[in-house]
Amino acid sequence: MLSRMLGPLAVTCLGLVVLFVFFSALGAVSPGEVLLPALVVGVLATLFLGHSLIVSRHLREHGNQDMFRSVNALRERRGF
């Protein structure tokens, strides 16, 4: 149950980080002025990075045959 929830939570964390960076780049939000949300976004970015590293390590070590089959089927369907 928890593993099914981690994917959408990781994507939500990434979306919030990208949203904060976008508004910071526009100049609407200054990370120095809003310290608490900047710290929360930093924690979310760290959690997303950790999740990504764990998933990539798991796929590298154990392999995921279902995923490899689906990727190969998509490639064969497209022709490359």
Image: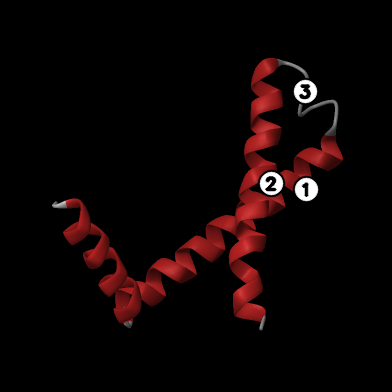
Residue under label 3: 30
Tell whether 75 sits left or right of 4.
Answer: left
Task: Return the residue found at the far left.
Answer: 79
Tell whether 42 sits left or right of 29.
Answer: left
Mark closest to the chain's N terminus, 2 or 3: 3
Q: Are marks 2 and 3 in contact (CB under 8 Å)?
A: no
Helix, strand or loop at mark 2: helix
Q: Where in the figure is residue 25, as x and y percent of width and height?
A: 64, 21
Residue under label 2: 42
* Relative to 40, residue 63 above or below: below
Q: Are marks 1 and 3 in contact (CB under 8 Å)?
A: no
For the residues labelled 2 and 3, the Cα–Cα distance comes to: 14 Å
Q: Where in the figure is residue 68, as x and y percent of width and height?
A: 27, 72
Q: Residue at x 14, y 52 (%)?
A: 79
Quadrant in which the N terminus appears: bottom right
Q: Residue at x 29, y 80 (%)?
A: 65
Residue under label 1: 40
Helix, strand or loop at mark 1: helix
Q: Amino acid at mark 1?
A: Val
Instruction: Mark 1: give few (<14), some (14-19) or many (20+) Cα within 10 Å.
Output: few
Which corner quadrant of the image does residue 61 belong to?
A: bottom left
Q: Are marks 1 and 2 in contact (CB under 8 Å)?
A: yes
76 and 40: which is toward the camera: 76
Q: Where in the figure is residue 40, as x and y percent of width and height?
A: 77, 48
